[in-house]
Image: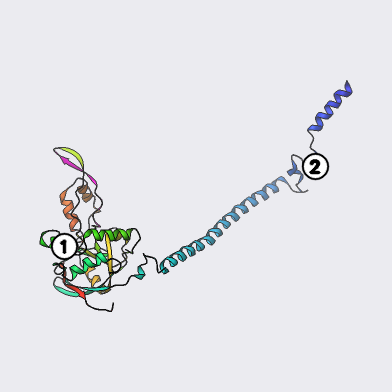
Amino acid sequence: MMMLRNAKLLSLSAKFQPSSTEPPHNSRRTNITVGTTPSSLERDCKLSRRNLSKSSLLLLLSTQTTLTPLLDFSKAQAEDTTSSNPNNPTNCGNRVPTTKAFVDVSIDGEPIGRIIIGLYGDDVPAGTARFTSIVSGKAGISYRRKEFVKIMPGYVQHGGIRSYGVDAERATAAVGTLQNLIEEWERGRRGEICNENKAGSVGIVVRDPSIPPPKTKLVARNGKLAMEEEVMAVGPNGTEFVITAVDSPELEDSVLVIGKVLEGMGVVEKIREVKTVRDNTSSPYFRVAKVIGDKRAVVAERGFNRPYSKVVVTNCGLIESQTL
């Protein structure tokens, strides 16, 4: 019995002993060289951890530095390919003016010069036809003796033909209806034609850029507060036009580009120097007045950025020339 009991103990102890082929459970301690203390080992581990973090940071920075030029180069290469593709419909460099028009301008009766405009008849036929019919007077109306009504930091805007009376009826019957202009403008929004408002661009206003979409406002009726939709002002009739002095991408939501200034940007700069009514839309009093539906705020807003001096088109027409 004693021999059997000792044999069982030996077999049980043999199960818990590590085999000769497996490393011992606490093998890390056996790898410590003679003379290495635990404190020096801990210090070495800390240093290696710090070096590892620094190496990772340097690797990350070097990766970003290496990838950024590659991404920029790929983007520039794609833009260059798009701009150099002659079949790209939105390539603005391919547009060639087909017709030239002129506009003579005066400030308070003093002539300041002539603006010569090149029109893109092949790209925007409806917009070009409408503008030429008015600037030449063939539509029975003309821009002569009509004023520039707004001077913004990036562009000047002509008031076009008034939206009432006989002139309004003739403007409606002019070549190229407003709906045709909107359709061409929507083609530009879809990227089918170029509609970039670069510096020196000339465009017809198809919707008022200063009028936002209709909003609800708080009004007082019979001693009670009520919400109603804001009444929008009369929209453009397709006769107002703008001339940009700098790149004005904000106009792409309201203007159809029909041409560019070939000569006379100095005249545009003189118009921009005219003093205007200060824009006060940032005033908290004006904002409150707009919210409560005060009509005085609406009237005041129409006068913002209007020139104090009379900036008038004294003469206009087409230039009969084959060389553009």
Res 273 visible: no
Residue 38 image position (x, y, % from top left): 71, 45
Is 208 above or below relative to 223?
below
Kindly tell me whether residue 21 is visible in this rendering.
yes
Q: Please, what secondary structure does the residue beneath circle 1 have?
A: helix
In the image: residue 3, left or right of residue 96 = right
Nearest-to-viewer mark from 2 and 1 = 1
Quarter of the rendering occupied by the C terminus: bottom left
Quarter of the view holding residue 206: bottom left
Residue 64 in the image, given as x and y percentages of width and height: 53, 58
- Please tell me which residue lies in front, 236 or 54: 236
Quarter of the view holding residue 54: bottom right
Q: Which residue is mark 1?
A: 171
The N terminus appears in which quarter of the rendering?
Answer: top right
Between marks 2 and 1, how big is the CA–CA gap?
Answer: 100 Å
Residue at image position (21%, 67%) is 131
The residue labelled by disc 2 is: 21
**Magenta span:** 209-221
Relative horizontal placement of residue 32, taking residue 293 as reference (left or right): right
In the rendered image, the vertical position of residue 224 relative to residue 261, given as above or below: above
Observer-nearest of 51 and 9: 9
* Vertical order, 304 against 101 (above or below): above
Label 1 crowd (10 A; few <14 / some 14-19 / many >=20): many
State the residue at coordinates (88%, 22%): 2
- Sequence-wise, the earlier of marks 2 and 1 is 2
| Amino acid on which disc 1 is placed | Ala
Q: Residue at x 25, y 67 (%)?
A: 128
The image position of residue 51, as x and y in percent, is 62, 54
Residue furthest out toward the left: 165
